[in-house]
Amino acid sequence: QVQLQESGPGLVKPSQTLSLTCTVSGGSITTNYYYWSWIRQSPGKGLEWMGAVGYSGDTHYSPSLKSRTSVSRDTSKNQFTLQLSSVTPEDTAVYYCTRGLLEYDYWGQGTQVTVSS
C-alpha cells in the first residue's frame, strides 16, 4: 500500500517561498512509469494541478504557475518537494501530494498552508 505524507510550514509570509515535502512509503518514486504530483485546493475553489516529477526525474508544470513553481525529488529519501515562490494570500490552500499525472490513485492527507503577514 502506497502512502504519501506532506510536511512543511503551515504559515508563510507574503513574498516568501512556500516549501513542502512529500514522503512516500510502500513504493519507490523511481518505479516505472509513475509520476508524482502536487495539487492544491483554495477556499471555495476546485482542485488545481501544480506540477509533477516523473520516475526518471523529468518535471512538468501548470502553465499558469510555471514561473513560480519548482518540483524536485530526493531518491535517497524517497521524497519529492514543491517550492512556490513569491506567494500571496491567493496561494492560501490545502496542498496535496499525489501519485499520477492525469489521474491520481494515491493521495496524501493534505496540509493547510496560509499566506499571511
Image (tube, rainbow, N blue to C red):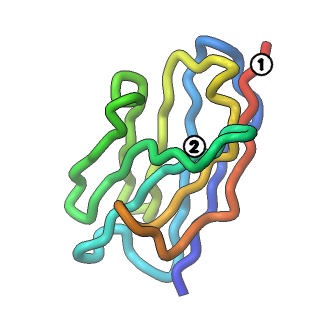
* First of labels 2, 1 by sequence position: 2
Q: What residue lies at 50% left-to-right and 63% top-to-bottom? A: 98
- Three-letter amino acid code at disc 2? Leu
Vertical side of 92 occupied by 71: above or below:
below
Q: What residue lies at 36% left-to-right and 62% top-to-bottom? A: 102
Q: Position of residue 61 (x, y in %)?
A: 33, 40
Q: What residue lies at 48% left-to-right and 41% top-to-bottom? A: 82
* Quadrant the N terminus occupies: bottom right
Can you identify the residue that label 1 sits on? Answer: 116
Can you identify the residue that label 2 sits on? Answer: 20
Q: Secondary structure at mark 1?
A: loop
- Three-letter amino acid code at disc 1? Ser
Measure the C-alpha gap from mark 2 to mark 1: 17 Å
Q: Secondary structure at mark 2?
A: strand
Residue in the foreground of this view, choosing between 10 and 114: 114
Vertical side of 108 occupied by 105: above or below:
below
* Quadrant the C terminus occupies: top right
